[in-house]
Image (cartoon, rainbow, N blue to C red):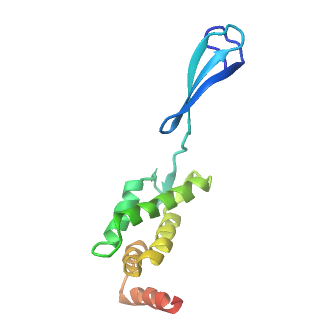
Amino acid sequence: MKCPFCGFAESKVIDSRPNDETIRRRRECLSCQKRFTTYEFVEHMPIVVIKRDGSRQSFDRVKLINSMVRACDKRQVSLADIEAIADEIELEVQNSLEREVPSTRIGELVMRRLKSVDEVAYVRFASVYRQFKDISTFMEELNKLLMEK
């Protein structure tokens, strides 16, 4: 870390304190012995979602949660469970190191997790996500679900 007073390139850390998402470090220049404070924080790269029509928009956690809340309406799925699923999906997408993620991938991640939490919510989400055109495609998805049991 370069000293803001004399420009010397080396300093020692006197004190280090973590805050919410930052780390505050008190430093001392090894040349002029003056002290200064630095702050370190984790830089989150924005995730861009590629929609089916080719348009792009920023990843929106609230939108993800709202879609799951609609699918879980009047079901025994707590908001804490839904938020935990959203956390898992967001973490998986962040850790993939891809900055642009197709919405289909996010939809598949949601369906995989909803299937293990509540099958009715899974079918509800799948019916909107997969855009079931008629009752036969809906029945095909139900039959797949029954075959897996």
- Residue 117 in the image, given as x and y percentages of width and height: 44, 75
- All told, the count of numbered labels is 0
Residue 37, compared with residue 59, is above or below; it is: above
The quadrant of the image that shows the N terminus is top right
Residue at the far front: name it: 15
Task: Classify 115 as above or below 85.
Answer: below
Residue plotted at (46% across, 53% down): 59
Residue at the location (37% across, 67% down)? 68
- Residue 2 vertical placement versus 126 (above, below): above
Give x and y (percent) for residue 125.
Answer: 39, 73
Q: Position of residue 100 (x, y in %)?
A: 55, 53
Q: Residue at x 37, y 76 (%)?
A: 121
Residue at the left extreme? Answer: 74
- 56 lies left or right of 11: left
In screen coordinates, is 68 left or right of 52? Answer: left
Residue 27 quadrant = top right
- Which of the pair 80/108 is nearer the observer? 80
Q: Nearer the viewer, residue 86 or 137?
A: 86
Location of residue 61 in the rendering, given as x and y in whole percent from the top left corner: 42, 55
Residue 128 higher or lower than 100, as above or below: below
Q: Nearer the viewer, residue 67 or 116?
A: 116
